[in-house]
Image (tube, helix red, strand yellow):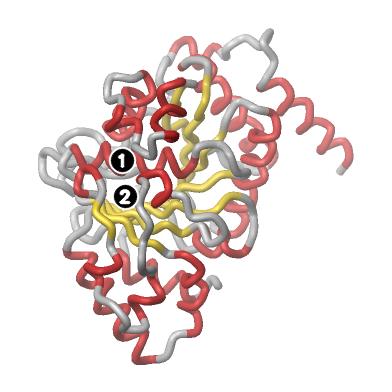
Amino acid sequence: MSGQVEKLKVLVESMTSDSLRVDQSLRSDPDPRGELPRLQAGEPRVIAVTSGKGGVGKSNFTLNTAISLGLSGTRVAILDADLGLANIDTLLGVAPRYNLLDLVRGDVGLDEVVITGPGNIRIIPGGSGIPELARLSEAELARIMTFITQLESETDILMLDTGAGLGPGVMGFLKAVRDIIVVVTPEPTSITDAYAMIKAVYSENPGAEIGLVVNMARDGAEGRQVAEKLGLVAQRFIGRKPRFAGYIPTDTLVRRAVMRQEPFIVAYPQSEAARCIRAIARSLVPPGDPAFPASRVGVPGAVRPREGLAGFLRRILGSF
């Protein structure tokens, strides 16, 4: 076991070495993502965005990607599922009055809970009420299923902004979702924690499809290099290799937008970071996918039967 750990340490350290050469596979294929499978028409797709550690820009990525999709015509909702430190509302400069628990208890309606953001995205503050879903009465369960049905009819994609790390409040969601994006930076601690997250997800949810987004990269070459090397480590020690979903470069305009509490794709649409976010959104599903109207895009995942939001809710209730 100690030998395996040492080998893993060497491989992880090699990802951050300035002297590391980009693999031949990356030189011959500048975009290793490949063509993604087309989606089936029907219920909304649920995709979770997570990270091995905090401070990697996960919530900022979720928000700006959702807005990019929304501006392209996709009906997107975000469930702010970070039980410890909800960030989506802060990034938008809003203070929600209600959360999901207020909704299921019947105190308020769906329209009172939902916050509308740029691109007509809808944000559902989860707050500390999410674990309470496992303790709902039959009447409350019936009420939330009614809201889920309403949300399904108005949503193409539900994005979950989970917490960071391997706590039960995070893994509960990741065990219930098939499509997962792990946000990582080139820093050694982020890479190590991302590997731990990938290993845990594949162990707890063998059917998961994981995509890697490298944030705060120097450039595209470093982004692809980090994703490829992390993927090789996963392939070697886990037997599964997450795909490269894209990168976002270090950009001073991102920090400026955060300080202004405004999404950078709105505040600085011509920035390099915004360009990369749009590229990720466009690449999530090939153009002309029958799952959405011509102006819409979708999310990654193998072609398979989809249970929609109701199926997701059933899995969540069994995870907490």
Q: Position of residue 94 (x, y in %)?
A: 35, 52
Q: Label for residue 62?
A: none
What type is the residue that disc 1 sits on?
Pro
Q: Are marks 2 and 1 in contact (CB under 8 Å)?
A: yes
Give x and y (percent) for residue 31: 40, 20
- Residue furthest to the right in view is 2
Q: Residue furthest left?
A: 294
Is residue 73 placed above or below 98 in the rendered structure? above
Q: Residue at x 74, y 24 (%)?
A: 13
Mark 1 lies on residue: 37
**Residue drawn at (28%, 57%), measured in percent from left and top?**
115
Q: Quadrant of residue 287?
A: top left
Residue 16 pos. (x, y %): 67, 20
Of 250 and 217, nearer the camera is 250
Quadrant assignment for the C terminus: bottom right
Q: Is residue 230 above or below residue 79?
A: above
- What residue is pinned by disc 2? 303
Q: Is residue 149 left or right of residue 216?
A: left
Q: Nearer the viewer, residue 31 or 320?
A: 320
Q: Is residue 212 left or right of residue 275?
A: right
Task: State the SS at label 2.
Answer: loop
| 320 versus 261 height, above or below | below
Callout 2 amino acid = Val
Q: Quick one: 145 or 63, which is closer to the camera?
A: 63
First in sequence: mark 2 vs mark 1: 1
**In which quadrant will I find the N terminus?**
top right
